[in-house]
Image: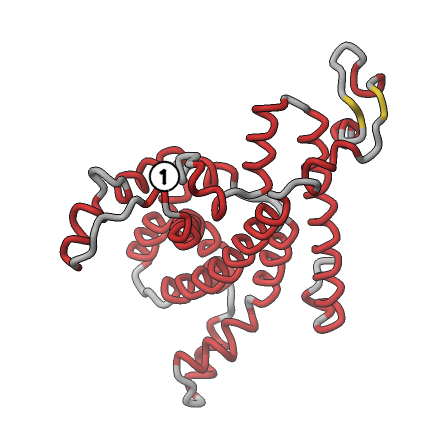
């Protein structure tokens, strides 16, 4: 709570949090009274929207594939392989991406593009490619984590439902849409709501380390978290960072509450509260 108070203060370490001068909403101005406000808000929202949709669809798809494996050993092996990227540091992931995209020695420029007859691309100076690169890296790192949650939910479904459906002639596709997806609906909605609650937060490491903090890429890689960090490096104002966190939390709370309200109207049993 003390952090929230700092958002409305001209913080002075000598006076302390509660002794610092109250300045109202002055700390919030730098987020909105700048030409970058629209860009960082657009990037943050669009990236997170794409992450939520793609991560949910791919996680459920892979979880269903894994649940169809009869060998428990093979299932655990594939789970481990899929989860491994989630455990890799974003810094390491950034250098892996650099190994592929480096203009001088990257695998794409030196091995793939020559086969296609395409000239080298200066990836770290071309913003238009990075929405795809950032989204791909995010999905690569995170799909395994969500996949395990969905797989646990699918394994918990009573197999008698599938046996009864098979006896009535329902194929795998019909079983997925009539049994699997409805039975994991509550888990799916819960994970989506939690993701919506953080839709104004961005993965700082992903947007800072993976593009190597290249200024040429800011139009498509600058988000609220990286903008605040760079601003603090230059200004060193703690009150401004607290204001950004306060703003992100309030917007997240509002979005979760509205989303939950809509879900409650449609399907009361799937609402979080």
Closer to the camera, 82 or 1?
1
Residue beneath the point at 67% across and 23% down: 237
Relative horizontal placement of residue 169, taking residue 254 as reference (left or right): left
Relative horizontal placement of residue 194, taking residue 50 as reference (left or right): right
Closer to the camera, 46 or 72?
46
Q: What number of labels is visible?
A: 1
Residue beneath the point at 41% across and 36% down: 214
Q: Which residue lies furthest to the top in this view?
A: 14
In the rendered image, the vertical position of residue 205 relative to residue 118, given as above or below? above
Report x, y in % for residue 170. Answer: 43, 86
Residue beneath the point at 20% across and 38% down: 105
Closer to the camera, 189 or 164?
189
In the rendered image, the vertical position of residue 3 relative to residue 43, given as above or below? above
Report x, y in % for residue 56. Answer: 50, 61
Closer to the camera, 52 or 22?
22
Local SS, label 1: helix
- For disc 1, the neighbor class at 10 Å (few under 14, some 14 to 19, many from 20) is some
């Amino acid at each position: 709570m003390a952090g929230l108070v700092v958002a409305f203060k001209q913080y002075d370490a000598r006076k302390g949090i509660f002794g610092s001068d109250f300045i109202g909403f002055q700390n919030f101005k730098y987020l909105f009274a700048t030409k970058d406000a629209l860009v960082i808000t657009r990037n943050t929202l669009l990236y997170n929207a794409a992450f939520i949709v793609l991560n949910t669809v791919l996680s459920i798809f892979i979880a269903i594939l894994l649940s169809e494996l009869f060998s428990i050993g093979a299932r655990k092996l594939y789970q481990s392989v899929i989860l491994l990227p989630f455990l890799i540091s974003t810094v390491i992931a950034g250098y892996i991406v650099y190994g592929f995209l480096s203009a001088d020695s990257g695998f794409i420029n030196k091995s793939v593009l020559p086969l296609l007859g395409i000239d080298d691309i200066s990836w770290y100076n071309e913003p238009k490619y990075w929405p795809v690169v950032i989204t791909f890296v995010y999905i690569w790192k995170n799909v395994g984590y969500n996949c395990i949650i969905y797989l646990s939910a699918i394994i918990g479904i009573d197999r008698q439902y599938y046996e009864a459906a098979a006896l009535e002639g329902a194929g795998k596709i019909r079983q997925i849409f009539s049994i699997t997806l409805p039975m994991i609906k509550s888990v799916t909605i819960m994970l989506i709501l939690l993701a919506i609650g953080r839709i104004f937060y961005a993965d700082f490491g992903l947007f800072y380390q993976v593009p190597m903090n290249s200024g040429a890429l800011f139009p498509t890689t600058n988000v609220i978290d990286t903008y605040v960090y760079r601003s603090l490096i230059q200004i060193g104002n703690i009150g401004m960072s607290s204001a950004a966190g306060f703003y992100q939390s309030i917007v997240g709370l509002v979005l979760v509450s509205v989303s939950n309200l809509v879900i409650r109207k449609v399907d009361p049993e799937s609402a979080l509260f």
